[in-house]
Amino acid sequence: MTASAPASAQDQETALVERAAALHDLVAEDAAEADRERRLTDRVVDAITDAGLLSLTTPRRLGGYEADLATLVEVTRELGRACSSTGWVAGILNAGAWLAATLPEQAQREVWGENPHARVAGVLAPTAEVEHVDGGIVVTGEWGWASGSLHAEWTMAGAPLGTDADGRPENALILLPMSELTIKDTWFVAGMRGTGSNTLVAERVFVPEHRIMSMAAALDGEYRTEHADEALYRASLPGVLMLAALGPHVGMAQAVLEYATAKAPRRSVSSTTYTAQTDSVAFQLRLAEAAIKIDSALMHAHRAAADVQSAAEAGGLPEPLIRARVRMDSGWVSTLCREAIDDLMTAHGSSGFADFSPIARIWRDQETSSRHAILQTDVCKEVYGKALLGVEPNVSHLI
Protein backbone atom coordinates (compact mmCIF):
# COMPACT_ATOMS: atom_id res chain seq x y z
CA MET A 1 0.00 0.00 0.00
CA THR A 2 1.37 3.40 -0.94
CA ALA A 3 -0.71 5.35 1.58
CA SER A 4 -0.60 4.49 5.26
CA ALA A 5 -3.57 2.57 6.58
CA PRO A 6 -6.07 4.49 8.75
CA ALA A 7 -6.54 3.50 12.37
CA SER A 8 -9.84 1.60 12.07
CA ALA A 9 -11.58 -0.49 9.46
CA GLN A 10 -14.33 2.12 9.10
CA ASP A 11 -11.76 4.92 8.70
CA GLN A 12 -9.92 2.80 6.14
CA GLU A 13 -13.02 2.16 4.07
CA THR A 14 -14.03 5.82 4.16
CA ALA A 15 -10.53 6.84 3.10
CA LEU A 16 -10.52 4.41 0.17
CA VAL A 17 -13.82 5.78 -1.16
CA GLU A 18 -12.53 9.32 -0.71
CA ARG A 19 -9.40 8.46 -2.69
CA ALA A 20 -11.53 7.14 -5.53
CA ALA A 21 -13.62 10.32 -5.51
CA ALA A 22 -10.49 12.49 -5.45
CA LEU A 23 -9.29 10.85 -8.68
CA HIS A 24 -12.53 11.68 -10.52
CA ASP A 25 -11.17 14.47 -12.71
CA LEU A 26 -7.99 12.64 -13.69
CA VAL A 27 -9.88 9.45 -14.56
CA ALA A 28 -12.60 11.36 -16.43
CA GLU A 29 -10.02 13.27 -18.47
CA ASP A 30 -8.65 9.99 -19.85
CA ALA A 31 -12.01 8.26 -20.43
CA ALA A 32 -12.28 9.21 -24.10
CA GLU A 33 -8.70 8.10 -24.75
CA ALA A 34 -9.36 4.76 -23.04
CA ASP A 35 -12.40 4.28 -25.28
CA ARG A 36 -10.43 5.22 -28.39
CA GLU A 37 -7.32 3.13 -27.61
CA ARG A 38 -9.31 0.17 -26.18
CA ARG A 39 -7.34 0.14 -22.94
CA LEU A 40 -6.93 2.26 -19.83
CA THR A 41 -4.17 4.84 -19.92
CA ASP A 42 -1.02 4.11 -17.97
CA ARG A 43 -1.62 7.34 -16.04
CA VAL A 44 -4.96 6.10 -14.74
CA VAL A 45 -3.71 2.60 -13.93
CA ASP A 46 -0.76 4.06 -12.02
CA ALA A 47 -3.01 6.48 -10.14
CA ILE A 48 -5.56 3.92 -8.99
CA THR A 49 -2.80 1.45 -8.13
CA ASP A 50 -0.90 4.02 -6.07
CA ALA A 51 -4.13 4.95 -4.27
CA GLY A 52 -4.58 1.30 -3.24
CA LEU A 53 -7.81 0.95 -5.23
CA LEU A 54 -6.65 -2.27 -6.90
CA SER A 55 -5.65 -3.77 -3.54
CA LEU A 56 -9.06 -3.65 -1.86
CA THR A 57 -9.32 -7.44 -1.65
CA THR A 58 -5.62 -8.26 -1.28
CA PRO A 59 -4.96 -9.79 2.17
CA ARG A 60 -3.81 -7.27 4.75
CA ARG A 61 -0.94 -9.55 5.80
CA LEU A 62 0.42 -9.28 2.24
CA GLY A 63 0.15 -5.52 1.90
CA GLY A 64 -3.48 -5.06 0.89
CA TYR A 65 -6.54 -3.58 2.56
CA GLU A 66 -8.82 -6.64 2.92
CA ALA A 67 -11.71 -4.17 2.74
CA ASP A 68 -15.33 -5.20 3.04
CA LEU A 69 -17.62 -5.72 0.07
CA ALA A 70 -19.55 -2.48 0.56
CA THR A 71 -16.24 -0.67 0.05
CA LEU A 72 -15.70 -2.59 -3.18
CA VAL A 73 -19.12 -1.39 -4.39
CA GLU A 74 -18.46 2.22 -3.40
CA VAL A 75 -14.93 2.49 -4.79
CA THR A 76 -15.92 1.00 -8.15
CA ARG A 77 -19.03 3.21 -8.20
CA GLU A 78 -16.88 6.33 -7.80
CA LEU A 79 -14.46 5.17 -10.48
CA GLY A 80 -17.32 4.20 -12.78
CA ARG A 81 -18.83 7.66 -12.34
CA ALA A 82 -15.64 9.07 -13.90
CA CYS A 83 -15.00 6.33 -16.50
CA SER A 84 -17.08 3.20 -17.07
CA SER A 85 -14.11 1.11 -18.16
CA THR A 86 -11.96 2.17 -15.22
CA GLY A 87 -14.67 1.19 -12.75
CA TRP A 88 -15.16 -2.15 -14.49
CA VAL A 89 -11.45 -2.99 -14.62
CA ALA A 90 -11.06 -2.06 -10.95
CA GLY A 91 -13.94 -4.40 -10.10
CA ILE A 92 -12.51 -7.27 -12.15
CA LEU A 93 -8.97 -6.92 -10.81
CA ASN A 94 -10.22 -6.81 -7.24
CA ALA A 95 -12.37 -9.88 -7.89
CA GLY A 96 -9.29 -11.61 -9.32
CA ALA A 97 -7.27 -10.70 -6.25
CA TRP A 98 -10.02 -12.08 -4.02
CA LEU A 99 -9.97 -15.37 -5.93
CA ALA A 100 -6.18 -15.62 -5.63
CA ALA A 101 -6.48 -15.01 -1.88
CA THR A 102 -8.65 -18.13 -1.53
CA LEU A 103 -5.74 -20.29 -2.77
CA PRO A 104 -3.06 -21.76 -0.49
CA GLU A 105 -0.53 -19.47 1.17
CA GLN A 106 2.19 -20.63 -1.24
CA ALA A 107 0.23 -19.33 -4.24
CA GLN A 108 -0.64 -16.10 -2.46
CA ARG A 109 3.01 -15.39 -1.71
CA GLU A 110 3.93 -16.05 -5.32
CA VAL A 111 1.49 -13.31 -6.31
CA TRP A 112 2.13 -10.68 -3.63
CA GLY A 113 5.25 -11.76 -1.74
CA GLU A 114 7.57 -9.49 -3.70
CA ASN A 115 4.98 -7.12 -5.15
CA PRO A 116 2.09 -6.11 -2.88
CA HIS A 117 0.62 -4.14 -5.81
CA ALA A 118 0.38 -7.20 -8.08
CA ARG A 119 -2.85 -7.26 -10.09
CA VAL A 120 -4.89 -10.38 -10.90
CA ALA A 121 -7.35 -10.61 -13.79
CA GLY A 122 -9.92 -13.37 -14.13
CA VAL A 123 -11.72 -15.40 -16.82
CA LEU A 124 -13.59 -18.35 -15.37
CA ALA A 125 -14.97 -20.15 -18.43
CA PRO A 126 -13.26 -23.58 -18.61
CA THR A 127 -12.22 -23.26 -22.26
CA ALA A 128 -8.71 -24.73 -22.16
CA GLU A 129 -7.44 -28.26 -22.73
CA VAL A 130 -5.76 -29.97 -19.78
CA GLU A 131 -3.10 -32.64 -19.50
CA HIS A 132 -2.59 -34.16 -16.05
CA VAL A 133 1.09 -34.46 -15.10
CA ASP A 134 3.08 -35.07 -11.92
CA GLY A 135 2.59 -32.17 -9.54
CA GLY A 136 -0.17 -30.41 -11.44
CA ILE A 137 -1.56 -29.91 -14.93
CA VAL A 138 -0.47 -28.50 -18.28
CA VAL A 139 -2.97 -26.19 -19.98
CA THR A 140 -3.33 -25.16 -23.60
CA GLY A 141 -6.10 -22.97 -24.90
CA GLU A 142 -7.74 -19.57 -25.03
CA TRP A 143 -9.90 -17.51 -22.70
CA GLY A 144 -11.93 -14.65 -24.14
CA TRP A 145 -13.26 -11.46 -22.55
CA ALA A 146 -10.28 -11.04 -20.20
CA SER A 147 -11.05 -7.59 -18.79
CA GLY A 148 -8.07 -5.83 -17.23
CA SER A 149 -5.58 -8.42 -18.45
CA LEU A 150 -3.48 -5.74 -20.16
CA HIS A 151 -2.64 -4.40 -16.69
CA ALA A 152 -2.33 -7.66 -14.74
CA GLU A 153 0.67 -9.69 -13.62
CA TRP A 154 -1.47 -12.79 -12.97
CA THR A 155 -4.85 -14.16 -13.97
CA MET A 156 -7.32 -16.66 -12.59
CA ALA A 157 -8.79 -18.88 -15.30
CA GLY A 158 -11.19 -21.76 -15.68
CA ALA A 159 -9.98 -25.22 -16.68
CA PRO A 160 -11.75 -28.56 -17.25
CA LEU A 161 -10.31 -31.38 -15.16
CA GLY A 162 -12.40 -34.18 -16.65
CA THR A 163 -15.41 -35.83 -15.03
CA ASP A 164 -16.27 -36.82 -11.49
CA ALA A 165 -17.35 -40.28 -10.26
CA ASP A 166 -20.88 -39.63 -11.53
CA GLY A 167 -19.71 -38.62 -14.99
CA ARG A 168 -20.38 -34.91 -14.49
CA PRO A 169 -17.89 -32.30 -15.76
CA GLU A 170 -15.36 -31.29 -13.13
CA ASN A 171 -13.85 -27.83 -13.51
CA ALA A 172 -11.17 -25.91 -11.68
CA LEU A 173 -9.95 -22.39 -11.08
CA ILE A 174 -6.27 -22.03 -11.86
CA LEU A 175 -3.75 -19.25 -11.27
CA LEU A 176 -1.49 -18.34 -14.19
CA PRO A 177 1.32 -15.77 -14.52
CA MET A 178 0.66 -13.37 -17.38
CA SER A 179 4.33 -13.69 -18.31
CA GLU A 180 3.58 -17.22 -19.57
CA LEU A 181 0.55 -16.17 -21.64
CA THR A 182 0.08 -14.13 -24.77
CA ILE A 183 -2.74 -11.67 -25.43
CA LYS A 184 -4.65 -11.87 -28.71
CA ASP A 185 -6.12 -8.52 -29.76
CA THR A 186 -9.81 -9.40 -30.15
CA TRP A 187 -11.65 -6.66 -28.25
CA PHE A 188 -13.56 -4.78 -30.98
CA VAL A 189 -16.93 -3.89 -29.48
CA ALA A 190 -19.51 -1.11 -29.22
CA GLY A 191 -19.08 -0.40 -25.51
CA MET A 192 -16.69 -0.85 -22.58
CA ARG A 193 -13.88 -0.55 -25.10
CA GLY A 194 -11.43 0.74 -22.51
CA THR A 195 -11.54 -2.52 -20.54
CA GLY A 196 -9.21 -4.16 -23.07
CA SER A 197 -11.10 -7.44 -22.66
CA ASN A 198 -8.95 -9.37 -25.12
CA THR A 199 -8.27 -13.10 -25.42
CA LEU A 200 -5.63 -14.88 -23.34
CA VAL A 201 -3.65 -17.69 -24.98
CA ALA A 202 -1.76 -20.48 -23.20
CA GLU A 203 0.54 -22.94 -24.97
CA ARG A 204 1.45 -25.85 -22.69
CA VAL A 205 1.69 -23.85 -19.49
CA PHE A 206 2.41 -25.88 -16.35
CA VAL A 207 0.16 -25.15 -13.36
CA PRO A 208 1.40 -26.58 -10.04
CA GLU A 209 -1.08 -28.21 -7.69
CA HIS A 210 -1.07 -25.33 -5.20
CA ARG A 211 -2.43 -23.00 -7.90
CA ILE A 212 -5.47 -25.19 -8.63
CA MET A 213 -8.83 -25.12 -6.84
CA SER A 214 -11.96 -27.15 -7.53
CA MET A 215 -14.76 -24.95 -8.82
CA ALA A 216 -17.38 -27.16 -7.17
CA ALA A 217 -15.62 -26.88 -3.82
CA ALA A 218 -15.27 -23.12 -4.19
CA LEU A 219 -18.98 -22.73 -4.95
CA ASP A 220 -19.64 -24.61 -1.70
CA GLY A 221 -17.37 -22.18 0.17
CA GLU A 222 -14.57 -24.73 0.56
CA TYR A 223 -11.54 -22.62 -0.28
CA ARG A 224 -7.89 -23.61 -0.01
CA THR A 225 -6.55 -20.69 2.04
CA GLU A 226 -5.14 -21.73 5.40
CA HIS A 227 -6.27 -18.44 6.96
CA ALA A 228 -9.73 -19.40 8.14
CA ASP A 229 -9.86 -16.37 10.43
CA GLU A 230 -10.02 -13.96 7.46
CA ALA A 231 -13.76 -13.44 6.96
CA LEU A 232 -13.50 -11.83 3.53
CA TYR A 233 -12.15 -15.06 2.03
CA ARG A 234 -15.10 -17.06 3.33
CA ALA A 235 -17.53 -15.04 1.18
CA SER A 236 -19.68 -16.53 -1.57
CA LEU A 237 -17.71 -16.75 -4.83
CA PRO A 238 -20.64 -15.81 -7.10
CA GLY A 239 -21.56 -13.05 -4.65
CA VAL A 240 -18.13 -11.44 -4.85
CA LEU A 241 -18.03 -11.71 -8.64
CA MET A 242 -21.43 -10.05 -8.98
CA LEU A 243 -20.66 -7.31 -6.48
CA ALA A 244 -17.50 -6.42 -8.39
CA ALA A 245 -19.71 -5.50 -11.37
CA LEU A 246 -22.43 -3.52 -9.60
CA GLY A 247 -20.63 -0.36 -8.51
CA PRO A 248 -19.62 0.64 -12.06
CA HIS A 249 -23.21 0.32 -13.26
CA VAL A 250 -24.50 2.69 -10.60
CA GLY A 251 -21.60 5.08 -11.23
CA MET A 252 -22.36 5.21 -14.95
CA ALA A 253 -26.00 6.05 -14.30
CA GLN A 254 -25.06 8.71 -11.76
CA ALA A 255 -22.70 10.31 -14.28
CA VAL A 256 -25.46 10.62 -16.89
CA LEU A 257 -27.86 12.03 -14.27
CA GLU A 258 -25.30 14.65 -13.25
CA TYR A 259 -24.63 15.59 -16.88
CA ALA A 260 -28.30 15.90 -17.86
CA THR A 261 -29.10 17.90 -14.73
CA ALA A 262 -26.19 20.31 -15.25
CA LYS A 263 -27.09 20.93 -18.91
CA ALA A 264 -30.84 21.34 -18.37
CA PRO A 265 -30.93 25.10 -17.53
CA ARG A 266 -29.19 25.92 -20.83
CA ARG A 267 -31.12 23.54 -23.10
CA SER A 268 -34.52 24.21 -24.58
CA VAL A 269 -37.13 21.55 -25.27
CA SER A 270 -37.38 21.24 -29.05
CA SER A 271 -40.73 21.93 -30.69
CA THR A 272 -42.13 23.54 -27.52
CA THR A 273 -42.20 26.99 -25.93
CA TYR A 274 -39.82 25.87 -23.16
CA THR A 275 -36.51 27.72 -23.36
CA ALA A 276 -35.06 25.68 -20.50
CA GLN A 277 -35.54 21.98 -19.81
CA THR A 278 -35.73 22.81 -16.12
CA ASP A 279 -39.17 24.38 -16.71
CA SER A 280 -40.60 21.34 -18.48
CA VAL A 281 -42.81 19.05 -16.41
CA ALA A 282 -42.06 16.19 -18.81
CA PHE A 283 -38.33 16.67 -18.21
CA GLN A 284 -38.85 16.89 -14.45
CA LEU A 285 -40.79 13.61 -14.44
CA ARG A 286 -38.16 11.82 -16.51
CA LEU A 287 -35.40 13.12 -14.25
CA ALA A 288 -37.23 12.09 -11.09
CA GLU A 289 -37.92 8.60 -12.38
CA ALA A 290 -34.30 8.12 -13.43
CA ALA A 291 -33.01 9.39 -10.09
CA ILE A 292 -35.20 7.06 -8.05
CA LYS A 293 -34.16 4.09 -10.21
CA ILE A 294 -30.51 4.92 -9.56
CA ASP A 295 -31.17 5.27 -5.82
CA SER A 296 -32.98 1.92 -5.86
CA ALA A 297 -30.12 0.28 -7.75
CA LEU A 298 -27.63 1.45 -5.14
CA MET A 299 -29.81 0.14 -2.32
CA HIS A 300 -30.07 -3.27 -3.99
CA ALA A 301 -26.30 -3.33 -4.49
CA HIS A 302 -25.68 -2.59 -0.82
CA ARG A 303 -28.27 -5.13 0.32
CA ALA A 304 -26.45 -7.77 -1.73
CA ALA A 305 -23.10 -6.68 -0.29
CA ALA A 306 -24.47 -6.82 3.25
CA ASP A 307 -25.95 -10.29 2.69
CA VAL A 308 -22.67 -11.73 1.40
CA GLN A 309 -20.49 -9.91 3.95
CA SER A 310 -22.58 -10.76 7.01
CA ALA A 311 -22.70 -14.45 6.09
CA ALA A 312 -18.93 -14.51 5.59
CA GLU A 313 -18.39 -12.89 8.98
CA ALA A 314 -20.72 -15.48 10.50
CA GLY A 315 -18.61 -18.27 9.02
CA GLY A 316 -19.64 -19.03 5.45
CA LEU A 317 -22.24 -18.65 2.74
CA PRO A 318 -25.72 -17.13 2.92
CA GLU A 319 -28.59 -19.58 2.91
CA PRO A 320 -29.65 -20.70 -0.60
CA LEU A 321 -32.64 -18.36 -0.87
CA ILE A 322 -30.51 -15.34 0.06
CA ARG A 323 -27.85 -16.39 -2.45
CA ALA A 324 -30.53 -16.49 -5.13
CA ARG A 325 -31.74 -13.06 -4.01
CA VAL A 326 -28.20 -11.71 -4.33
CA ARG A 327 -28.22 -12.92 -7.94
CA MET A 328 -31.59 -11.22 -8.44
CA ASP A 329 -30.38 -8.01 -6.81
CA SER A 330 -27.39 -7.99 -9.16
CA GLY A 331 -29.44 -8.39 -12.32
CA TRP A 332 -31.92 -5.80 -11.06
CA VAL A 333 -29.16 -3.26 -10.45
CA SER A 334 -28.03 -3.49 -14.07
CA THR A 335 -31.63 -3.28 -15.32
CA LEU A 336 -32.49 -0.24 -13.22
CA CYS A 337 -29.32 1.56 -14.31
CA ARG A 338 -29.94 0.78 -17.97
CA GLU A 339 -33.53 2.03 -17.69
CA ALA A 340 -32.41 5.17 -15.85
CA ILE A 341 -29.85 6.00 -18.54
CA ASP A 342 -32.46 5.40 -21.24
CA ASP A 343 -34.83 7.83 -19.47
CA LEU A 344 -32.07 10.42 -19.18
CA MET A 345 -30.96 10.10 -22.81
CA THR A 346 -34.56 10.67 -23.90
CA ALA A 347 -34.95 13.63 -21.56
CA HIS A 348 -31.66 15.22 -22.59
CA GLY A 349 -32.32 14.89 -26.31
CA SER A 350 -30.77 13.36 -29.39
CA SER A 351 -27.56 15.42 -29.17
CA GLY A 352 -26.63 13.12 -26.31
CA PHE A 353 -25.91 10.44 -28.91
CA ALA A 354 -23.39 12.55 -30.82
CA ASP A 355 -19.83 11.27 -30.94
CA PHE A 356 -18.61 14.32 -29.03
CA SER A 357 -21.00 13.71 -26.14
CA PRO A 358 -19.56 11.94 -23.07
CA ILE A 359 -22.94 10.43 -22.27
CA ALA A 360 -23.02 8.69 -25.66
CA ARG A 361 -19.95 6.74 -24.56
CA ILE A 362 -21.54 5.93 -21.20
CA TRP A 363 -24.73 4.80 -22.94
CA ARG A 364 -22.71 2.43 -25.14
CA ASP A 365 -20.81 1.19 -22.11
CA GLN A 366 -23.91 0.49 -20.08
CA GLU A 367 -25.75 -1.18 -22.95
CA THR A 368 -22.77 -3.53 -23.29
CA SER A 369 -21.89 -4.24 -19.66
CA SER A 370 -25.48 -4.83 -18.57
CA ARG A 371 -25.58 -7.80 -20.95
CA HIS A 372 -22.81 -9.59 -19.03
CA ALA A 373 -23.82 -13.23 -18.53
CA ILE A 374 -23.92 -13.08 -14.73
CA LEU A 375 -26.24 -10.02 -14.85
CA GLN A 376 -28.77 -11.25 -17.43
CA THR A 377 -31.99 -10.17 -15.74
CA ASP A 378 -34.28 -12.88 -17.09
CA VAL A 379 -31.90 -15.59 -15.88
CA CYS A 380 -31.61 -13.82 -12.51
CA LYS A 381 -35.41 -13.73 -12.23
CA GLU A 382 -35.66 -17.42 -13.04
CA VAL A 383 -32.97 -18.28 -10.49
CA TYR A 384 -34.78 -16.31 -7.79
CA GLY A 385 -38.23 -17.54 -8.77
CA LYS A 386 -37.16 -21.17 -8.60
CA ALA A 387 -35.55 -20.56 -5.21
CA LEU A 388 -38.70 -18.90 -3.88
CA LEU A 389 -40.73 -21.91 -5.00
CA GLY A 390 -38.19 -24.49 -3.84
CA VAL A 391 -37.76 -25.85 -7.38
CA GLU A 392 -34.58 -27.90 -7.74
CA PRO A 393 -32.18 -28.11 -9.42
CA ASN A 394 -31.82 -24.45 -10.24
CA VAL A 395 -30.76 -23.28 -13.70
CA SER A 396 -27.39 -21.84 -12.67
CA HIS A 397 -24.63 -22.89 -10.30
CA LEU A 398 -23.58 -19.26 -9.87
CA ILE A 399 -25.69 -18.53 -6.79
Image: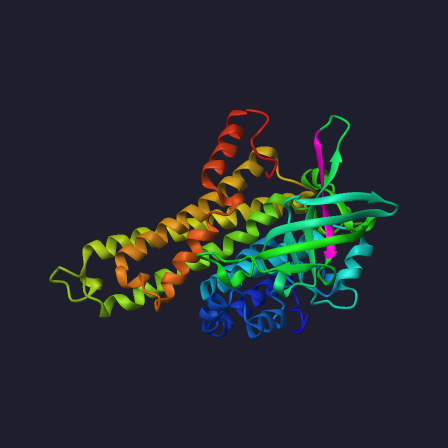
| Viewer can see residue 50 | yes
Q: Is residue 135 above or below residue 54?
A: above
Q: Which residue is drawn at 60% across and 33% down?
A: 320
Q: Is residue 284 above or below residue 330?
A: below
- Image coordinates of residue 370 in percent, x first then y, are 46, 49
Which of the two residues, 148 or 99, is positioned nearer the viewer here? 148
Classified by dominant secondary structure, the portion drawn in magenta counts as strand
What stretch of residues is rendered in magenta? 168-176
Residue 213 image-quadrant placement: top right
- Left or right of 157: which side holds 185? left
Q: Is residue 93 above or below residue 240?
A: below
Which of the two residues, 137 or 155, is positioned nearer the viewer here? 137
- Image coordinates of residue 169 in percent, x first then y, are 70, 33
Q: What coloring was used for the rendering?
A: rainbow
Which of the two residues, 168 or 228, is positioned nearer the viewer here? 168
- Badge count: 0
